Amino acid sequence: MAAFAESTPCWVDVSLPDLEAGKRFYGELFGWTFSETSDTTAGRGAEAFREGRRVAGLVAKKDGRMPTTWGVYFATADIVGLSRRITAAGGTLVRGPLALGRSASIAQAADPAGTVFGIRQAGDDPGFERTGLPGSFCWTELYTRDKARVDPFYESVLGFRGTDLPGAAIDFRMWSPPGAEPGEAGAIGGRSVITDAFPAELPGHFLCYFSVADCDETAATAVRLGGRVTAPPFGIPHGRMSVLVDNQGASFAVLSGAADPVGPKGGAGAEAGPEPE
C-alpha cells in the first residue's frame, strides 16, 4: 500500500489506562481483532484490525495524568521539516520526532491554541489499511475556541485549503489537502468552533469519526458495554451520526449511511459534542 498523500489523515490511536479493557470494548463495538500487546519505543500497545486490515492503534497510558483520548496523525514526507514549521508558526512539539524502528516516525504537536495532533512519516508501514468502511476511520474535525489563530496555522503548516461551509448556521470550515481542489468533494476533515452549547470546560480537541453499518445500534451497544452517549444519533446530510464515550473516557464519533468513503462525513460542527474528561 502506498504512503498517504501529504497532510491527509493516515492513522489514529487511543490512549487508555486499561489496554485489555479497551480491546474488549472496541472488539465488540467495531468487530476489531488485535495484534499481541507489545512494548515499543512509543510505549505498550496493540494494533486493531477489521477483516484482517489495520485500522487503529490502542496505547497504554504511561502516566495517569495524561488524557484518555483518541488522536489523529497527518501524513508527511518530511517529519523533521514539518516539525520545524510547526514551531516557527507558533505551535509546540509535545513529543518527537520519534522513530518506530523501520515502520514509521511520529511526533505529537500542539497548535497555537493548545490542541494536540500527530504527524507521521511512513517507513515500511504507511498507516491505515482500511478507511471509510464499517469499523474504520472516515473523518476528523477540530473543535476550537480560537479560529483566528488555528485557521492560518493549519493552512500554512499543513497546507490545508479551507472552504467555509456555505449557508450553514454554524461556523464550520472544510479542509482539503495540498494540491486538492478546495471544497466538499476533496475534503479530508474540518474545523468547528466551540460555542456556548458545549460545556465551558471542554478543551480544544480533534474528534475522530468511525464508519458503522448502523449508528443507532452502535450507540446502544456502546452503552451496553459501559460507554456513554453525549450526542444521541441524529441525521446529517452525509448520513446519521452520534458522539460516544468509551468505557474509559475517550470520546469519538460514529457515522452510518454515508454515500462514499471519502469527503466530508462529520457533523459539520453539530451543536453537541464530547464531554471533557
Image (spheres, rainbow, N blue to C red):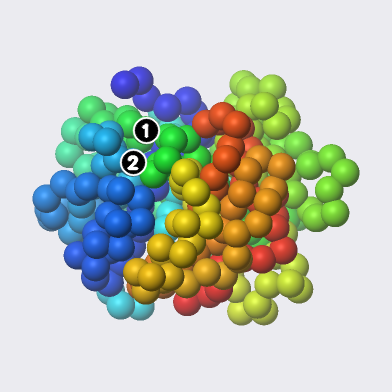
- Residue behind mark 1: 130
Viewed as shown, does residue 70 lie left or right of 38? right
Pinpoint residue 210: horizontal percent, then vertical percent: 47, 47
Viewed as shown, does residue 198 lie left or right of 123? right
Disc 1 residue type? Answer: Arg
Asked whether residue 170 appears in the rendered view, the answer is yes
Whether 118 is drawn above or below 112: the answer is: above
Whether 140 is drawn above or below 95: the answer is: above
Quadrant where the N terminus sits is top left
Q: Residue at x 19, y 65 (%)?
A: 20
Q: Residue at x 35, y 20 (%)?
A: 2
Q: Residue at x 68, y 72 (%)?
A: 198
Whether 30 is drawn above or below 114: the answer is: above
- Residue behind mark 2: 55
Q: Quick one: label 1 or label 2, which is nearer the N terminus? A: 2
Q: Which mark is residue 74?
A: none
Q: Nearer the viewer, residue 211 or 156?
A: 211
Disc 2 residue type? Answer: Val
Q: Which corner quadrant of the image does residue 159 belong to?
A: top right
Disc tally is 2
Q: Nearer the viewer, residue 107 or 225?
A: 225
Pinpoint residue 149: horizontal percent, then vertical percent: 70, 55
Q: How far is the residue under mark 1 from the one under mark 2?
A: 6 Å
Q: Residue at x 52, y 69 (%)?
A: 229
Q: Residues within 10 Å of mark 2 (few under 14, many from 20)?
A: many
Q: Are marks 1 and 2 in contact (CB under 8 Å)?
A: yes
Pinpoint residue 156: horizontal percent, then vertical percent: 64, 38
Viewed as shown, does residue 259 lie left or right of 99? right
